[in-house]
Each structure stands twice: as C-alpha cells, then as structure tokens.
Image (cartoon, rainbow, N blue to C red):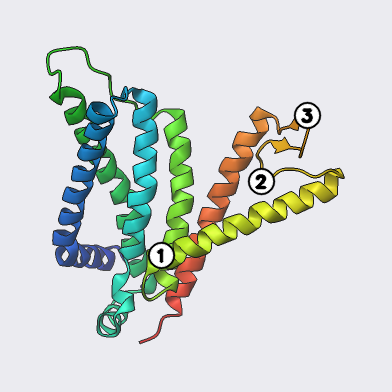
Amino acid sequence: MNYNFNMSRFGRLFVKHTVEHYKGYLMSLAVLIGVLVLGGCFLVYMVEARLDKGLQSAFYMMMLFLAGTIFTSTVLNDLGDRKKATAWLTLPASHFEKYLVAWVYSLLILLVIYTAAFYLSAYFVLHIKTPNGHTEGLFNVFEKRTLQMWLVYAFLHSVAFYGAVFYERLHFIKTGFVFFISLALLVILNKIMLSALLGRAVEFTPPFANIRFSGDGPEVSLADNLKEPYMLWLVTVLAVIFWIAAYWRLKEKQV
C-alpha cells in the first residue's frame, strides 16, 4: 500500500474539501464575476476604451494574477486556526494528498473556472451595449503569449502557496510584502553586479532586461531569441522549487 498517495483516499479527501468549502467558493466566484463585469463596463462605457483583444488579454492576466494569488493565500486558512489545524492534520490521509487537494484547487481548477468566468463576463460586456451591432471578438486564451503568462502565474502561485503554508495569518499581505522586498533587493543587486562587471554605472534593471547606462550611452540587450526562453525556464524552475519547498514545509506541521 502506498502511504503517500492512494487514489481512492485522495478522491474522498477531495470530495470532503469540496463539500466543506463549496459555498465559500461559489460566493468568491460571484464576487469575481461582479468585479470582471464592473471593471469591463468601466473601461468600455466610462473610460470609453476599445476592448480589443490586446486589452482583453492584459485585463485577463492582471485579474488572474490578483485574484489567483489572493485565493491561493487563503486555500490553507485552516492551518492558521489551532482547532481546525488539529482536525486537518489528523485526517487519515497523507500530507501529500492534502497538499495535492489544495494545489489542484488553487491552480488547475482556479484557472479553468477563472477563464470561464472571464469569457462569460467579457461576452456580456461586449454585447450589452450594441447587441446587434459590430463588437470586438474575444481573445484566444490559448495563444502563445497567454500560455507564457500562465507560466508566470504558476510562479506567482507557487510563491503564494508557500506563503499560505509558511505563515499562519495574513498570508497574502505578508507574502506580498516579502516578495516585493525581495524583488527590490534583486534589482539593486543586479545593478551593482552589472556596474561592477561592465565598469560603468547602469540604471536599475531586473535580470534579463535591457541594460541602460546612466547618462548617455548605447543600450545593451539580450537577443530576443534567448531572452524569452531564459525567462520562461527561470520562472518554471522557481515555481517547482517553491512548490517543493511548500510541500516539505507542510510535512513539518505537527498537531
């Protein structure tokens, strides 16, 4: 018998989690659809922006990053309550199965439901004003750029997921604070290292971005055919590292 994973046991645990949390998840979905519709209506009818496919794609990713990380930060809220944490940790299931339920809900299921909610909201916004007239088409969520952004979201999810395991309260706020402080320190360190390596002062720049020298001077950039693969590989590897770290952190939890 595999004590780390059993499909029947995992299925029962998944059903249990769904039954206990579906009301809260449905309420969150209703709020999400409301925000998407109101945000789209504001852009189209108040700002009078043209909701073309490019803007739709940008709005899709921006809301995914925000809504997805917030939800991920709350998916393990039970660990922050001593009574609930005791019941959760003593369930007759492995830590990996418990981890996997939270991971599937906060990444795979969220992506599917969020995408469906976005398309429904976008269709409503685009047709409510001119149902018989010309309207913009819906962007293709499977286009290359969106698929690449999904990898970026996977990285953000892994950070939020680790924060949900690591912190007991205020998961989103604490994780976001540490993330942006770390990002700022990375940019500063990158500037210092590039300035020392090139022998000239450079402006603040994140890794793999174009290098701009302080004052006048040429701009140095990594070749486009190298920059994109490097960034995608980097975020993918970092996502896997944070997911693994979250699992081992979860295994350390004791009753």
**Residue visible at 51% across and 67% down in the picture:** 245
Instruction: Give the label on residue 3, or none.
Output: none
Mark found first going from the N terminus, 2 or 3? 2
- Point out the residue furthest to the bottom here: 255
Q: Is residue 4 visible?
A: no
Rounded to the nearest angstrom, the CA distance separating label 2 from label 3 is 18 Å
Provide the residue designation for mark 1.
Answer: 173
Total marks placed: 3
Q: Would residue 140 be found to the left or right of residue 184 on screen?
A: left
Element at label 2:
loop
Mark found first going from the N terminus, 1 or 3? 1
Q: Position of residue 192 (x, y in %)?
A: 76, 53
Of the residues shown, which amino acid type is indicated by label 3?
Pro
Residues tagged 2 and 3 counted as in contact (Cβ below 8 A)? no
Above-or-below relation of 184 to 129? below
Q: Position of residue 121 (x, y in %)?
A: 20, 35
Above-or-below relation of 255 to 167? below
The answer to which of 41 and 239 lies nearer the viewer is 41
Callout in the foreground (2, 3): 3
**Residue visible at 45% across and 68% down in the picture:** 247
Element at label 3:
loop
Above-or-below relation of 165 to 45? below
Residue 53 placement: quadrant: top left
Q: Would residue 22 be found to the left or right of residue 49 on screen?
A: left
| Figure quadrant of the N terminus | bottom left
Provide the residue designation for mark 2.
Answer: 207
Mark found first going from the N terminus, 1 or 2? 1
- Point out the residue furthest to the top here: 133
Of the residues shown, which amino acid type is indicated by label 2?
Pro
Q: Is residue 43 visible?
A: yes
Of the residues shown, which amino acid type is indicated by label 1?
Ile
Instruction: Give the label on residue 218, or none.
Output: 3
